[in-house]
Image (spheres, helix red, strand yellow):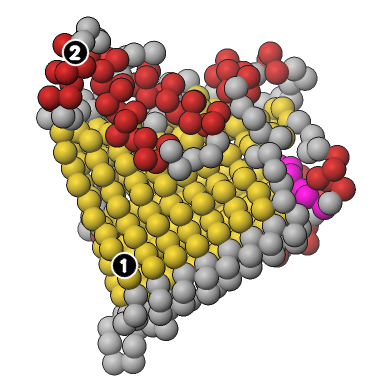
Amino acid sequence: MTQFNDQLAQVQGPEWLSAKRRESLELFTTLDVPQESVEAWKYTRVDVDFDALRPHGKRDVVSDVSALPASVQERLSGTDVGAFLVLDGPDVVYRTELPAELAAKGVIFTDLKTAVEQHADKVRQYLYSVVPAEVPDDTTIAAPGTTPSKSPDPSEGKFSALAAALWTNGAFVYVPRGVEVELPLGSFRVMSDAGTYTATRTLVVAEENAQVTFIDEQDSAPLPGTYAIGAVELVVKDGARVRYVSIQNWGEGVTHIQRQRGDVGRDATLNSLVVTMGGTLSRTEMQSYLRGQGADSEMLALYFANADQHFDHYTLQHHAAANAHSDLLYKGVNNDQAVGVFSGMIKVDLGAQKTDAYQKHRTLMLSSEARNYSVPQLEINANDVRCSHGSTTSPVDQEALFFLRSRGISKETAEKMLVTAFLEDVLGRVPLASVVKYIEGIIAKKVGAA
């Protein structure tokens, strides 16, 4: 792991950040890669030779959109974000400026590296506060004399420790108290260097009664032996509203590992959408920590795995305060020899009375050779709650498919129609028309109906 020390020595930054990076790298070296014996990683194994990993090459700034990758140009032509960053590997290669009226209100939107230099006080206050280097200890607070849940296995923090130590860049959003950002802000992340790794970090802070939407997209051509490791920290203060959208569409050969976590205050709302379409292996964790009374978390996701793709989603709805609400709906499609994994937990702390929590996972199987593993779980330590969880896995409706085919519709188009209809109750809850249109286009390509 000597190369990681060498890479860390080359990273410039203030001493407080350098110290945190060194501490994170030391933790990384002490941890094992999580194995199947670790419950949260039971169905997913990441085979990685850390000694062979090299960082993604640096990229220069471009002055015109036409110099960006074709996939990014296509997205920018159909997006409605108010301002955006484009990152190729570790570097920002293109950006648009935040509207002047938002900047005048104190809104900050820039890359994280620049934020460390220009807004050090705000970054230092919140960076690593939601997604630390180690795996957060989400042990449920239980009644005296009872046995609380086990703390997470330390190895679950292996990749987040690496991301905490060696992140090169990412996005930083700060919205002051009472300010509402109407148009979404966005980050388009691409990679173009096969056989490398990129570590990125997103930090979104919404102060009391603020409002913002952030769209985080990832896309690349096929890149064998490439790793995208990341962390997303969402700070949602009392009364604030944050909508976070992650769309992962890496090319074949990419391994994607990302931990996303929200800290939700009193009467605050976090709406998250996780879309997983690309890469060869993808492990995404989405966690909501409902810290304040009246907090609300909507957790949506959809994924479509085909060929030999392996998609793993791990979720946590942790209710730490009374009168909070969470609603999780994950829907996936598995085709060919693909593997889908869902492991979700609702934790309710002692004293978190009047909790209202729901968890639903549904999978559509388009192939008899595809596999699916679903593990919905509850751990409740309060006695006045309403919680439910459930999972279903089912094949495509052959009668519906036959009906469409009998009307002269091709097999590919018929499957696209059935898949889109299956995912509609997730897509229908996303008030971002350009995002929904883009996702439907990816689905069409997946079934060969584009």
Q: Is residue 19 visible?
A: no
Secondary element under disc 2, as helix, strand or loop, is helix
Task: Residue at 62% x, 45% y: name it.
Answer: 213
- 88, above or below 29, in the image: above
Quarter assignment of residue 346: bottom left
- Residue 113: mark in rendering: none
At x 28% / y 63%, what residue is drawn?
388
Q: Is residue 107 magenta?
A: yes
Residue labelled with disc 1: 387
Magenta span: helix, strand or loop, mainly?
strand
Q: Nearer the viewer, residue 248 or 419?
A: 419
For the point 58% across and 43% down, the residue is 200
**Image coords of residue 338 (percent x, y):** 24, 32
- Please give the name of the residue rendered at 54% of the width and 31% of the height, measured from the top-left corner: 433
- Image: 291 above or below 444: below
The x, y position of residue 271, in whole percent, is: 51, 51
**Dot 2 or dot 1, earlier in sequence:** 1
Front in this rendered view, residue 28 or 244: 244
Amino acid under label 1? Cys
Q: Quadrant of the C terminus?
A: top left
Above or below, comparing residue 286 to residue 144 in the picture: above
Residue in the foreground of this view, choosing between 344 and 123: 344
Residue type, label 2 = Arg
The range drawn in magenta is 106-111
Dot 2 corresponds to which residue? Answer: 405
Does the magenta-highlighted stretch encompass residue 126?
no
